[in-house]
Image (cartoon, helix red, strand yellow):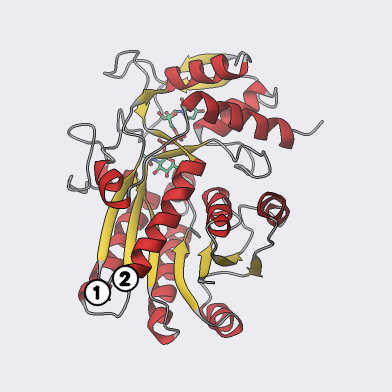
């Protein structure tokens, strides 16, 4: 069995990816410091797949922890690197935390990969690297624009670090995946998103409002240059997203050249406004969500959606889950975790 290290594997996208990797026959080792997840996620994974992944509680920014991991679990062939801080607002307030966490972790992995014969790394990037696009849908050749947050900058810098390392001839391969807006949960409701504190992202705030944990959802702006005035995003189901990682891993490990790098957008190709997403949630679940229109949120992009045709063509991957099903899954998960 091919052994894969998943950093941040108890997190939101990480846990869904672990499930898909196991179901595709990979052996998974997770490293996570549980800073934004909890250990019960392993139970959720095991309930779905029947396999408990190996788990190391530790920090990828600590190179000695990583050395011990590669020694204790020999033969790791590939890495999927999710472990990173991802709250845009927090990154503005604590830039050093973001630069240290997100960049040191990648440097450590890239340094150790040749030493432990790890062939390749799949890296979690974001559509945030494009900034406000000149046109939509946006493909991988679009220019990278200056980012407004340290979080966004870490994604841009990490992409550059991988690129420079590979072009310098390091004996490793990489696939960079630029996610649009991941939403939803596993249909089993065994795993999903577990936001700490007050959620910053739309869907956890929306589902917590539907569950009466929050009084009201605020729509950040209805005066954008879009058909209904709210922002437009490309909301991608987290299970669809997870499946793309399995395909990317397989492709990367099969690539002949050692110095190979590829970049893919992962999105549906459909732009949906914030108000349309709210409608989808209410339609799919029958639950009304109290909401009001508020001012714009600083730093928000007006509209962005993916041209995923490269991933469709080269990876043979496309999204399958309908947005209403995604909303039902998100709601099922929220109901499961809501304290009663
Ligand atoms: C942001 C980041 C993205 C990052 C992601 C996960 C940017 C431009 N984007 O995505 O890189 O990967 O977070 O952390 O930095 N909204 C409301 N009310 C709410 C919450 C959100 O109306 O209570 C709106 C926002 O204004 C936005 C949309 O919903 O238009 C999506 O917001 P959010 O879920 O926070 O994701 P992004 O900002 O798109």
Between 43 and 207, the one nearer to me in the picture: 43
- Residue 168 in which image quadrant: bottom left
Relative depth, front residue between 150 and 59:
59
Residue 42 placement: quadrant: bottom right
Query: At numbered mark 1, what does the secondary structure look like: helix, strand or loop?
Result: loop
In the picture, the disc for residue 173 is: 2
Check whether the beta carbons of the residues at disc 1 and disc 2 lie within 8 A of each other: yes
Residue at left 70%, top 50%?
A: 44
How far is the residue under mark 1 from the one under mark 2? 8 Å
For the point 61% across and 42% down, which residue is it? 192
Residue 110 drawn above or below residue 147: below
Give coordinates of residue 143: x percent, y percent. Answer: 17, 47
Quadrant of the frame with the N terminus: bottom right
* 163 relative position to 243: left or right: left
For ligand 1, tell me if the residue under mark 2 lies within 8 Å: no
- In the structure shown, which secondary structural element does the residue marked by tag 2 occupy? strand
Please give left or right for residue 35 compared with residue 267 in the image.
right
Residue on which the image places disc 1: 257
223 to the left or right of 47: left
Q: Position of residue 269 (x, y in %)?
A: 31, 33
Residue drawn at point x = 41 percent, y = 62 percent: 249
Q: Residue at x 52, y 64 (%)?
A: 7
| Quadrant assignment for the C terminus | top right
């Amino acid at each position: 069995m091919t052994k894969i290290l998943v950093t941040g594997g108890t997190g939101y996208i990480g846990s869904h990816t672990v499930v898909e990797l196991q179901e595709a026959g990979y052996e998974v080792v997770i490293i996570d410091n549980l800073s934004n997840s909890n250990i019960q996620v392993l139970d959720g994974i095991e309930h779905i797949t029947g396999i408990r992944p190996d788990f190391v509680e530790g920090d990828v920014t600590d190179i000695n922890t990583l050395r011990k991991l590669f020694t204790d679990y020999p033969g790791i062939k590939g890495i999927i690197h999710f472990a990173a801080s991802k709250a845009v607002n927090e990154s503005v307030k604590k830039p050093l935390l973001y630069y240290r966490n997100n960049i040191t972790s990648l440097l450590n992995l890239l340094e150790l990969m040749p030493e432990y014969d790890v062939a390749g790394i799949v890296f979690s990037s974001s559509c945030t690297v494009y900034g406000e696009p000149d046109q939509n849908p946006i493909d991988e050749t679009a220019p990278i624009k200056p980012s407004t947050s340290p979080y966004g900058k870490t994604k841009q810098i990490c992409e550059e670090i991988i690129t420079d390392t590979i072009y310098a001839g390091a004996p490793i391969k990489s696939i960079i995946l630029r996610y649009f807006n991941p939403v939803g949960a596993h249909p089993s409701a065994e795993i999903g998103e577990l936001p700490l504190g007050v959620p910053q992202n739309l869907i956890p705030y929306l589902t917590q409002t539907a569950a009466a944990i929050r009084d009201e959802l605020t729509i950040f702006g209805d005066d954008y240059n879009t058909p209904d005035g709210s922002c437009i995003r490309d909301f991608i189901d987290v299970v669809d997203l997870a499946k793309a990682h399995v395909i990317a891993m397989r492709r990367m490990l099969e690539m002949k050249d050692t110095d190979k790098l590829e970049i893919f957008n992962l999105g549906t190709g459909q732009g949906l406004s914030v108000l349309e997403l709210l409608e989808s949630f209410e339609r799919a679940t029958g639950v009304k969500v109290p909401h009001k229109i508020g001012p714009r949120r600083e730093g928000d992009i007006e509209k962005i959606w993916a041209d995923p045709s490269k991933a469709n063509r080269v990876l043979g991957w496309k999204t399958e889950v309908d947005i209403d099903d995604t909303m039902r899954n998100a709601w099922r998960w929220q109901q499961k975790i809501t304290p009663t």
